Structures are given as structure tokens and as C-alpha cells.
């Protein structure tokens, strides 16, 4: 039994959001839905709370009304194995939502996510301080994380940031050309899309406001 789990407050979209999330991630399904009764503050029979599993993590969602909304102060951090998984999750979660900076995004319900590959921390922790600094500068120029551009930053001779959308965002007074990026690794574990609404078992900086 999972002792601690995230609890998400929605206005009235908890069930819709849960179905959306489980359609994106593997190992995800709806566990149960409780409904408002006659004595509740909302329409009897409407969804009150939803319990679901998201890639093995149990999450609670509540339809509590419009009093509270999500902010970037809390986000769900996804460790994406390779560029294909980053691209897939980014496309799905920004649909109707809003891309941010440095791997940060908000989905169409306002919930913040970070889609980040483990290689980012490895590169930022390079014992060569110059290399680590160039990786940081590259990341700061990105919206969606681009693994090839991060790796290229380790071989550059001066600060260079590369936005995920293409083109070089030069940081600092001078920048040298980036050498060819290494081929990106194929993801080790990613099961692709799942049918939307399926209900059976089957660090950086936030967006500018």
C-alpha cells in the first residue's frame, strides 16, 4: 500500500483529467470514483473524487470547486528515458496547455509537469566546470529538453544555448560553433500511447508568467 500520494484539487474536471492522464502513461488506470450524494455541495451523482494510478504512482483527484488553482510551485516530475519519450510526452501534455522553459510545461488543466531525461543531471554534474556551465547555458535556452543539444554543449568551446525549436540562442558576448551532436539513444522503456480513458490495468525553471 502506498502510504503517501499526491492529492490534486480540480474545479470539476477531476474525472476527465484522470482519464486524460492514464491515456498517456503506461501502467496507468482508474481505481475508483466516489460521487456526491444528496447532502453534498455539488450535483448529486457527479464525481467527487477519483483515485487513479499513473505509471505505478497512486494519485487522488478532487472536484472541489474553483477556490484553488494549480501553480508552478508544485509539479509532477517525469524522468523521460530518451528523446522519443520526451517528444511524445511533451506533445501530449502541452496539447491545450502551455510550454514553459527548461523542460517545464502546464497541461490544459493548469497542472505543471517537468519532462526531464536523467542525462541532464549527469551532464550538469560533469567534473569539468566549463562543460557543466555550457550545458546549463544550453538548457536555459530550451523549452522542451533536447538531448542532442545538451550533449553538443559539452564539446563547445564557449557558452551556447540551443532552443528545442531549432537555431542557436547565443548567451554571452561570444559563442563558438557547436560540433555535431552524438546520435541520441533510443528509449529503454516506453510503451507509447494508450487508449484514451482506459480504465483497466493495462530542474530547472518554471514558465515565465
Image: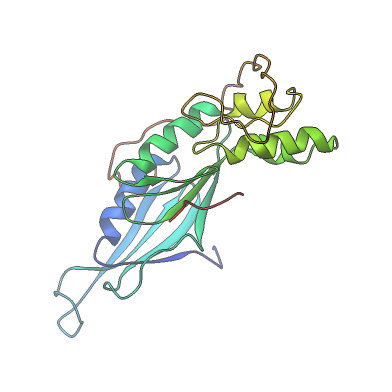
Q: Position of residue 1 (x, y in %)?
A: 54, 63
Q: Is residue 139 above or below residue 180?
A: below
On the rendered image, what quadrant is the C terminus found in? bottom left
Q: Could you tell me if residue 191 is visible in this image?
A: no
| 172 displayed left or right of 165 | right
106 left or right of 75?
A: left
> Is 56 or 109 nearer to us in this picture?
109
Q: As displayed, is residue 57 above or below residue 202?
A: below
For the point 29% across and 73% down, the residue is 64
| Image coordinates for residue 99, horizontal then vertical, percent | 42, 43
Q: Quadrant of residue 182?
A: top right
Residue nearer the viewer, 30 or 107 = 107
Q: Residue at x 68, y 40 (%)?
A: 136
Outermost residue toward the bottom in this view: 39
Q: How many marks?
A: 0
Can you name the residue that lies furthest to the front here? Answer: 173
Tell me the quarter of the picture where residue 133 sits. top right
Percent x, y for residue 28?
Answer: 41, 46
Q: Is residue 125 visible?
A: yes
Q: Is residue 184 left or right of residue 36?
A: right
Q: In the picture, residue 196 is in which quadrant?
A: top left
Along the line of sight, which residue is nearer the eye, 115 or 134?
A: 134
Residue 158 x, y percent position in the rendering: 74, 28
How is the model colour-coded? rainbow
* Front residue of 12 and 59: 12
Q: Is residue 177 above or below residue 94?
A: above
Amino acid at each position: 500500500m502506498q502510504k503517501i500520494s499526491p492529492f490534486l484539487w480540480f474545479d470539476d474536471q477531476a474525472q476527465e483529467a484522470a482519464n486524460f492522464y492514464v491515456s498517456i502513461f503506461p501502467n496507468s488506470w482508474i481505481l475508483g470514483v466516489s460521487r456526491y450524494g444528496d447532502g453534498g455541495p455539488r450535483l448529486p451523482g457527479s464525481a467527487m473524487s477519483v483515485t487513479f494510478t499513473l505509471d505505478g504512482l497512486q494519485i487522488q483527484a478532487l472536484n472541489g470547486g474553483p477556490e484553488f488553482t494549480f501553480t508552478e510551485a508544485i509539479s509532477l516530475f517525469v524522468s523521460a528515458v530518451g528523446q522519443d519519450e520526451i517528444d511524445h510526452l511533451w506533445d501530449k501534455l502541452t496539447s491545450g496547455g502551455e510550454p514553459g522553459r527548461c523542460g517545464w510545461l502546464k497541461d490544459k488543466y493548469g497542472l505543471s509537469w517537468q519532462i526531464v531525461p536523467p542525462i541532464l543531471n549527469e551532464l550538469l554534474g560533469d567534473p569539468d566546470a566549463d562543460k557543466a556551465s555550457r550545458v546549463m547555458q544550453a538548457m536555459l535556452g530550451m523549452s522542451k529538453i533536447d538531448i542532442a543539444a545538451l550533449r553538443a554543449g559539452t564539446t563547445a568551446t564557449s557558452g551556447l544555448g540551443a532552443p528545442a525549436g531549432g537555431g542557436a540562442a547565443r548567451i554571452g558576448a561570444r559563442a563558438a560553433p557547436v560540433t555535431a551532436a552524438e546520435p541520441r539513444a533510443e528509449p529503454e522503456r516506453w510503451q507509447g500511447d494508450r487508449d484514451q480513458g482506459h480504465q483497466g490495468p493495462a530542474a530547472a525553471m518554471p514558465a515565465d508568467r
